[in-house]
Amino acid sequence: MIEKTLVVTNKLGIHARPAGMIVDITGQAKSDISIVFEGSKANAKSILNVMMLAIPAGSEVKFEIDGEDEESVASLLESLFNDHFNEEPC
């Protein structure tokens, strides 16, 4: 199991588009993936679950990734966050 903490660095936080980008990565993964924000844990493969966390800009989120492709999933998520979801950074 990998736990990866990432910072939301785009101005608008995790709204519909970034949530969709997260689910594009997690939905194709074989691993079980959860996203944790301020004590709430959600299935990172569900766009509704990710959006319901209402994660604002500047927040830290933790991904819990467990499965055979956990390292590649962690790397893809890290790249997505580092690229500010292809949006304007904070």
Image: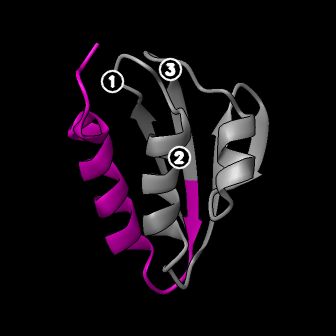
Tell me the quadrant of the picture where the N terminus can be found: bottom right
| 84 sits to left or right of 54 | left
Residue at position x 39%, y 68% from top? 73
> Mark 3 packing: few (<14 Cα in 10 Å), some, or many (20+)?
some
**From what the image shows, is residue 90 above or below residue 25?**
above
Residue at position x 47%, y 24% from top? 13
What residue occupies the far front of the structure in this picture? 16
Report helix, strand or loop for mark 3.
loop
Question: What amino acid type is highlighted by mark number 2?
Answer: Ala
Image coords of residue 37 (percent x, y): 66, 32
Label 3 and label 1: CA atoms lie apart by 8 Å
Contact between marks 3 and 1 (CB within 8 A): the answer is no
Residue 13: in magenta span: no
Tell me the quadrant of the picture where the C terminus can be found: top left
Residue at position x 68%, y 60% from top? 46
Question: What amino acid type is highlighted by mark number 3?
Answer: Ser
Contact between marks 2 and 1 (CB within 8 A): the answer is no
Image coords of residue 30 (percent x, y): 54, 85
Report helix, strand or loop for mark 1.
loop
Q: Read off the magenta span.
A: 64-90
Which labelled disc corresponds to residue 19? 2
Counting residues from the start of the chain, the first of labels 2 and 1 encountered is 1
| 67 sits to left or right of 46 | left
Q: Which residue is mark 3?
A: 59
Question: What amino acid type is highlighted by mark number 1?
Answer: Thr
